[in-house]
């Protein structure tokens, strides 16, 4: 389940650039819906192709946590009609796809420390924009270094399990905030209405909690590492909470 959720993760990156999107109340939900639909259709088509091209036994024996040394199912499928050229071609496609993913992740995730710094909640250097490109260069460089360190610290499966586990903690907390904010600020303007409120958010929170407990039982090392990473941010949180006078939001650029 964790591996499948990693494949669908990334939808949460779009709201990180909301400040640079026209009419975000309309366009971001629309982009999220269309993007998720495209991904669902693409994955469904790919899996149908795998089952059409390969016997079920070969799909089961493809690369997974149980068969770490086996070829990925996409490479096995490509080999079935391209011969020995199949796996190398699929590897090239994987690399190109990964580069696109890295570009999108750095572009969007770098906006989080940038926005925090602009609001006076993080180191001010992260709020500086490059003179010619207007990108938060400090944030991008630091994230790139941190990502490189993570890449050499564990296997791909370990890192994705850690990321998905940590991410779903915040997905559940963010969804829970919908109820808290409606209670605390009932008259606050809301350009986007939560679809299916309150049943759908409650169902999402219940599924998220179940997933987190299951991951704690089945992937303890990765789960604990994710919790440690989250806890490592507490000293920074306490620093800015206790010293609000140093937090001075920067003027808009």
Image: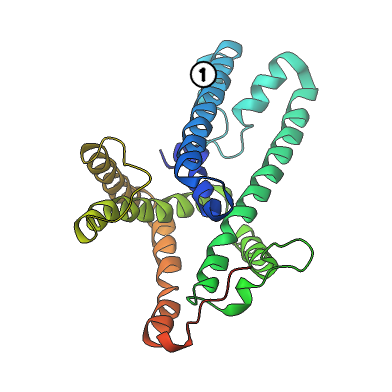
- In this view, the residue in front, 142 or 241, is 241
Which residue occupies the extreme top position in the image? Answer: 52
Query: How crowded is the residue under tag 1: few (<14 C-alpha within 10 Å), some, or many (20+)?
Result: few
Q: Secondary structure at mark 1?
A: helix
Which residue carries the number 1 mark? 57
Numbered label tally: 1
What colour scheme was applied to this rendering of the protein? rainbow
Asked if 47 appears above or below 102 in the picture, the reply is: above
In terms of depth relative to the viewer, which is nearer, 104 or 195? Answer: 195
Q: Quadrant of residue 2?
A: top left
**Image x and y of residue 169, in percent:** 35, 55
**Quadrant position of the N terminus in the picture:** top left
Residue located at (57% from left, 60% from top): 111
> Is residue 65 shown to the viewer in this render?
no
Compared to residue 101, the image places residue 71 above or below, namely: above
| Residue at the spot 54% in from the left edge and 73% down from the top edge | 117
- Look at 65% across and 23% down and name the residue there: 76
């Amino acid at each position: 389940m964790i591996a499948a959720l990693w494949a669908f993760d990334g939808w949460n990156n779009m709201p990180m650039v909301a400040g640079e999107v026209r009419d975000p109340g309309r366009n971001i939900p629309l982009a999220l819906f269309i993007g998720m639909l495209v991904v669902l259709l693409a994955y469904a088509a790919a899996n149908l192709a795998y089952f059409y091209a390969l016997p079920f036994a070969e799909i089961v024996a493809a690369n997974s946590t149980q068969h770490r040394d086996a070829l990925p199912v996409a490479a096995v499928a490509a080999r079935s009609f391209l011969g020995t050229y199949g796996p190398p071609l699929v590897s090239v496609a994987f690399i190109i796809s990964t580069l696109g993913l890295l570009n999108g992740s750095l572009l969007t995730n770098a906006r989080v420390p940038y926005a925090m710094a602009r609001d006076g909640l993080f180191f001010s250097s992260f709020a500086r924009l490059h003179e010619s490109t207007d990108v938060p260069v400090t944030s991008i460089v630091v994230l790139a270094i941190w990502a490189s360190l993570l890449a050499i610290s564990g296997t791909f499966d370990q890192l994705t399990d850690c990321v998905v586990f940590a991410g779903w903690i915040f997905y559940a907390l963010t969804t829970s905030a919908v109820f808290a904010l409606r209670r605390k600020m009932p008259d606050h303007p809301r350009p986007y209405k939560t679809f299916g409120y309150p049943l759908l958010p409650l169902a999402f929170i219940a599924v998220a909690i179940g997933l987190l407990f299951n991951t704690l039982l089945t992937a303890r090392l990765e789960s604990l590492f994710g919790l440690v990473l989250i806890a490592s941010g507490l000293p920074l949180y306490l620093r800015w909470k206790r010293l609000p006078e140093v937090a001075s939001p920067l003027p808009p650029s």
